[in-house]
Amino acid sequence: MTLPGSAAISAFEDAYVERARRELGDRLAPAEAAVLDRQPLADGRPALAGWWCRPGAEGLIVLPNPWDDRGAIAGHDEYCWALSEHVLDRLTPALGGTHSRVYWDFVLRPVLLLVLAAALDRRLYCLALARLRPDLPVAGGAPLPVPVTMAEAIGIGRSDAGNRALGSLLASRLGLALEPLDQRSSPPGDEQPLRSSLPGRALIALGLAAEIVLRRLLSLRRGRRVVLLRSPGISRLDRLRLWARVRGLQIVTAVAHPATGAAGTDTRQELAELFEGDEERVASLAAAACLLLPRTVLEDHAALCSLSAETYAAPAPLLVGNYGAHEVENEFIARCADAGKRLAFTQHGGTYLQARVNTQERLECRPGSTFVSWGGTGEDIRALPSPRLERLRDTHRGGERVVILEWIVPPEPYVLRFASTPLGNQGYRQDSALGEFVRSADRTRPQLFLKRFPAFLEGASRDPEVAALPHRPPATRRTAVRLMQTARLAVIPYPDTALIEAMVIGVPVVAFWDPGLWEVRDDARVPFDALREAGVLHEDPRTAAAQVDRVYERAGEWWSAADVQAARSAFLQRFAIPGDWLSGWSRFLGELSE
């Protein structure tokens, strides 16, 4: 079996190996082993490592990042999609039962795309080892564990232990020698998890109680059903208002899938063997995907179907928010699609219809379905105002702080999807750029305030200048939105949801990022070009810092200037259209139910 795009992938692999040989040169010779994760050898011997490690990491000789070639990202995303098609074609009859290819597509595709992208990226590293230093022992790991859920399957691709296991499978298929070499433990991060105050915990408890009451109310069905499944950005009051307007509307949220049966590897090995007649790359990647199929779709599939039927009842027209690796939801979506019900998906992030390559768009902008966008246009795309953004529109009140919104910390070092964002160790450049911005700020340095990435992630570390910034606001103003509403200026170092929120709120914005790592589609360039010409958007963190110093004292006056407001207006018209969201959503849900 030869997939479309296979020749281009092979040519890229050949070119990458030669690039690595050329760039590493004499540094290849001292390596005494290779590692499959980010941890050096315990005895200090130099080891080759992949592009998920920081360049110059102690004890590691890091291969160059292949995704510096940004032109290759789209082709690899296309290849992963074609490979997922092939895997689904083979798995559908093998999984048994009466479920169709359409059914398994909606159940499995989100996790397959991520697992296959991770395996394709790690296989490239193993292939480079096999061609550059085939003599080296490779620090192997335990066999791939059987994940209970889709989230666990994806988590394997995010962890060092999981990548040792995944890399070991791929390395062994390429003939590399795996050995049980001792490696150092992961260093602790410098961050502590945030803890809610007593009043905060009380508010959470009240919110949970209100949610239970609301769910019971919204579960009352009348008339022809249409289901709003997972609704990010829609408040409890919004849900009540929609429910009152749309006859037969049912609004439901996610439920967890409890594990019931014991997992076994024999079935997964049998599924992996379905691909042994294919070319080596396809067979290796498909085998990894089969071994990472969660219990929810094999041993627990009957229980999954029962829970889905109990929670969501019979198939109905459906509007889905945040489609992904949520197996109970996916089973219901799959039943709706299999029954021929109308499907629509809603935007839940800022890079939709903006980034040059966005895997999630393929999942949700599907033929035969409708995509509800905050402002983008195109075939089968319906532009509707966002309920959440409409609540935020022009709510800026002003203040003294310069609030900096941090990107993911630590960044995802292991590639899980091919996208027009920083990939691998390119993510560490975000932290370096933010540090350069802070060091370059002069008059406004005392006003800088860091809104840290909200999740607590093991191994989080920052540029010392960034880490030293004030970052703990009062409990009532912890969210990024509240901080921006009461800021003098907002500094946004990446083009995602936070930038759109800031523009909607109306806080004066200075933004900066490397356009070579955050690539936008051709049809989205004009609004960004206008922001650049108005002095809002910069490529260099030092010029962004100079702009913050320059406009801080007259931020409101600068932001009100005609050219800046024209740029803001053009940006919002493309990425966050204004309007009566309730009428638009009610009308659309009514159309779905007809």
Image: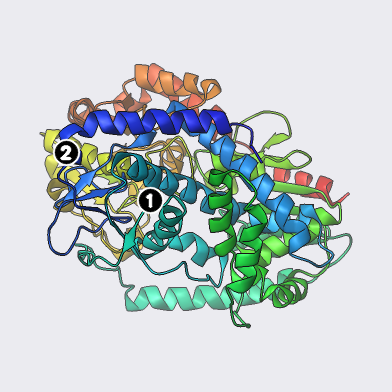
Task: Find residue 22 and name its label.
Answer: none
Residue tagged by mark 1? 414
Residues 146 and 309: in front is 146
Describe the element under mark 1 as helix, strand or loop: loop
Q: Amino acid at mark 1?
A: Tyr
Against 56, residue 259 (above or below) is below
Q: Where in the figure is residue 58, as x and y percent of width and height? A: 14, 51
Describe the element under mark 2 as helix, strand or loop: helix
Q: Where in the figure is residue 226, as x and y percent of width and height? A: 80, 57
Against 168, residue 60 (above or below) is above
Q: Residue at x 74, y 76 (%)?
A: 302
The answer for how far apart the CA atoms under marks 1 and 2 are is: 23 Å
Q: Residue at x 74, y 72 (%)?
A: 305
Q: Left or right: 99 with respect to 218?
A: right
Q: Amino acid at mark 2?
A: Arg
Q: Residue 442 is drawn in which quadrant?
A: top left
Task: Find residue 27 and name its label.
Answer: 2
Mark nearer the N terminus (1 vs 2): 2
Q: Residue 549 is drawn in which quadrant?
A: top left
Q: Where in the figure is residue 184, as x and y percent of width and height? A: 20, 65
Against 249, residue 565 (above or below) is above
Q: Where in the figure is residue 185, as x and y percent of width and height? A: 22, 67
The figure's colour scheme reads rainbow
Q: Residue at x 39, y 23 (%)?
A: 531
Question: Is there any visible trace of residue 322 in the rendered image?
Answer: no
Q: Left or right: 588 with respect to 384?
A: right
Q: Residue at x 58, y 50 (%)?
A: 283
In front: label 1 or label 2: 2
**Crowding at mark 1 (Cα within 10 Å: few <14, some 14-19, many 20+):** many
Residues 539 and 326: in front is 326
Against 362, residue 167 (above or below) is below
